[in-house]
Amino acid sequence: MKDIRKYDLAIIGGGAAGLTTATHVKRCKDLSVIVISKDAHISYSECGIPFKLAGKVHDFDSLIVKTPDFFDKMGIDIELETEALSIDILNRKIELENCDILFDKLVIATGGKQRIPQPLQKYIGMDGIFTIQTLADGMKIESALLSAKTMVIIGAGAIGVETAAGIAKRGIDTTLINRGPAILSRLIDPDMAEIVSEFLKSIGVNLITGNIPDSIEGKERVENVLISGERIPADIVIISTGILPDVELAENAGISTGELGGIIVNEHLQAFVDGNFSTDIFAGGDCCEITDFITNKGTLVQLAPAARHMATIMANNICGKDTVLKPLLGPSIYVAGDLLIGSVGLTSKRARSEDIDVITGYATGVTKASYFPGSSDIHIKLIFSDDRLTGAQIIGKSGVKERIDSLAFMIKKKATIEEMLSIETCYAPPVSTVVDPLMYAIKDAFRKIKART
């Protein structure tokens, strides 16, 4: 007969959402808490893995944020390399291989799983083919890189682009393949993506767009990627074609999922079960759908800051502090070599899909006074709808994050273009120009709006 263990709170998933919920709950209430995770490691930076592969981080231990001892001292039980086989909502029970966990409250923070296109699924498991998500994935890739001369990355989303830039800097022949004609299509518009594409080519990345591999060849291990009849040598292939919400466990338990594949939650992050939002079952992080600030529709915000924010909401509600999650924007920044790529809100493509009419403003400037050493170009694109800022994209080697953060705040405050024309900015030759390039993008949009009206 299986052992049975009872907890006030059980959390499935040991990523940012699950662990942050656990620690916040323990700080505000004396509850028994268990975290169940399939991963072999806990509390580490997934976002740091591409930079370890690029050689910018000394070792993988540097990516570990908190050790198991930290959670042990807090009184949080951690079960690593442990899969939750099923959830029995009615009897408040989680089935594990060696025991059953009874709970009063449950948090589902199962995160995301790799989206592998059907034609590539048969190659998973071949020696030399990897996905990049966990710390263990990163360690395996790093080991393979020690003897590799060629690498192919399939998928030019944010992680694919970051990884390609880092590996190319190591002197490994790197090819990046993207199905669509423009890379980073979920984050930035094609005109901005072209800036990133040219940068990648300048550091030695062989970029192939508008195509998908015909097959991956190899006997005992990968040897080539065949695309449009051309064989590209590959000692290593990384498949980085996106992340889907990992919701199979929740769905099997009768928890509802939405059109985007994520768990349906309300503003308290309570899951929808049997026609109602449960007061005891919560979901947060990459596995759930929340509300988009601009469209007021369901969206997936699969970013660490959003996961931690959702964890705080869940923990407060578990502890009896009525707290709601307001709609999110999900500002983001990615680093490809020396290039920073930031975005927030709508892209022009997304606006079209939502039937939102937009006008854009664009400017290219420099990040320091022209006579000051180290000045570099910065490209700014602003997107307005009904005179209000609804999106921004910025690319440069410095000054990107702070501008994206401030523009995200302006979107949240529903700033109009007239209000943005009166923005005051600071100036010092080592860090800025007298007129911030942002102002030129605002004025460009203002002229177009006036011309239309």
Image (cartoon, rainbow, N blue to C red):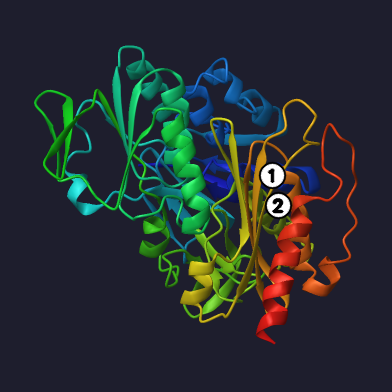
In the rendered view, tell whether residue 338 sits above or below residue 447: above
| Residue furthest bottom in the image | 453
Left or right position of 429 against 232: right
Q: Which mark is residue 60?
A: none
Left or right position of 142 against 237: right
Q: Can residue 111 be seen here?
A: no
Crowdedness near tag 2: few (<14), some (14–19) or many (≥20) residues, C-alpha within 10 Å: many
Q: Label 1 near label 2: C-beta < 8 Å?
A: yes
Q: Can residue 91 be seen here?
A: yes
| Closest to the observer, 208 or 57 | 208
Residue 317 pos. (x, y %): 72, 61
Quarter location, residue 399: top right
Work out which quarter of the rendered image holds the N terminus and state it.
top left
Which residue, given by chain and number where applicable, does mark 1 sit on?
400
Residue 186 pos. (x, y %): 48, 58
| Closest to the observer, 442 or 253 | 442
- What is the distance, in whole Å, between disc 2 and disc 1 at their CAs? 6 Å
Q: Label 1 is placed on what type of residue?
A: Val
Q: Which mark is residue 404?
A: 2
Residue appearing at x 80%, y 29% in the figure: 372
Quarter location, residue 150: top left
| Residue furthest top in the image | 147
Q: Label 2 is placed on what type of residue?
A: Ile
Work out which quarter of the rendered image holds the C terminus and state it.
bottom right
In the rendered view, tell whether residue 160 sits above or below residue 166: below
Residue appearing at x 23%, y 27% in the figure: 234
Left or right position of 123 against 58: left
Crowdedness near tag 1: few (<14), some (14–19) or many (≥20) residues, C-alpha within 10 Å: many
Left or right position of 365 against 349: right
Quarter location, residue 248: bottom left
